[in-house]
Amino acid sequence: MTARWIVRPQWRGAKQAEWLTLTADACFEVDGVEYWIPESYCSDGASIPAGLGILWWICGSPTDADNCEAGFAHDALYLTQALSRSDADEVLRLLKMEYEEWQGTSGKMSRFRAGR
């Protein structure tokens, strides 16, 4: 599976906000198929249970930029059921890695690259 952003999401909402809102349409591609997310779409970022502190250490806060970007796509895929749950989860992982490559960092997701 491949996934990448075509039009990166732009949003408003503070770092600790419960909901983030797209300020423009966003578009990502999975295996050559485009998925558009409309302006004003709301997301809670990456839904990482607060009680699982180790996941926050590994993945970061739900509202970190890499989690927000991937979270918009993940939430839209879950809502529309355009892909299976496991495929939507894989898109989240791939878009988080794509964000790190775009930023030129080898951040949190780099440790998960080798197994896939």
Image (cartoon, rainbow, N blue to C red):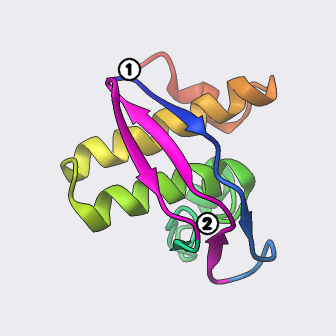
Please report the residue visible at 45 percent of the width from the left and 45 percent of the height from the top: 92
Q: For residue 45, which quarter of the picture?
A: bottom right
Please report the residue visible at 64 percent of the width from the left and 43 percent of the height from the top: 8
Check disc 2: other Cα within 10 Å, few if <14, some if 14-19, many if 20+. few
Q: Give the range drawn in magenta.
A: 18-39
Asked if residue 49 is positioned above or below residue 74 in the image, the reply reads below
Asked if residue 61 is positioned above or below residue 31 in the image, the reply reads below
Please report the residue visible at 60 percent of the width from the left and 29 percent of the height from the top: 98
Please report the residue visible at 63 percent of the width from the left and 58 percent of the height from the top: 68
Residue on which the image places disc 1? 116
Quarter that holds the C terminus? top left
Q: For residue 104, which quarter of the picture?
A: top right
Check disc 1: other Cα within 10 Å, few if <14, some if 14-19, many if 20+. few
Q: Which amino acid does label 1 sit on?
A: Arg
Residue on which the image places disc 2? 53
Mark carried by residue 11: none
Check if residue 12 falls in the magenta segment: no
Q: For residue 101, which quarter of the picture?
A: top right
Whichever of callouts 1 and 2 sits on the residue coming sooner in the sequence is 2
69 on left or right of 47: right
The spot of residue 39 in percent (x, y) is: 57, 66
Mark 1 residue element: loop
Q: What residue type is labelled 2?
A: Gly
Distance CA(mark 1)–CA(mark 2): 24 Å
105 on left or right of 48: right
The spot of residue 88 in percent (x, y) is: 32, 47
Check if residue 26 falls in the magenta segment: yes
Asked if residue 9 is positioned above or below residue 18 in the image, the reply reads above
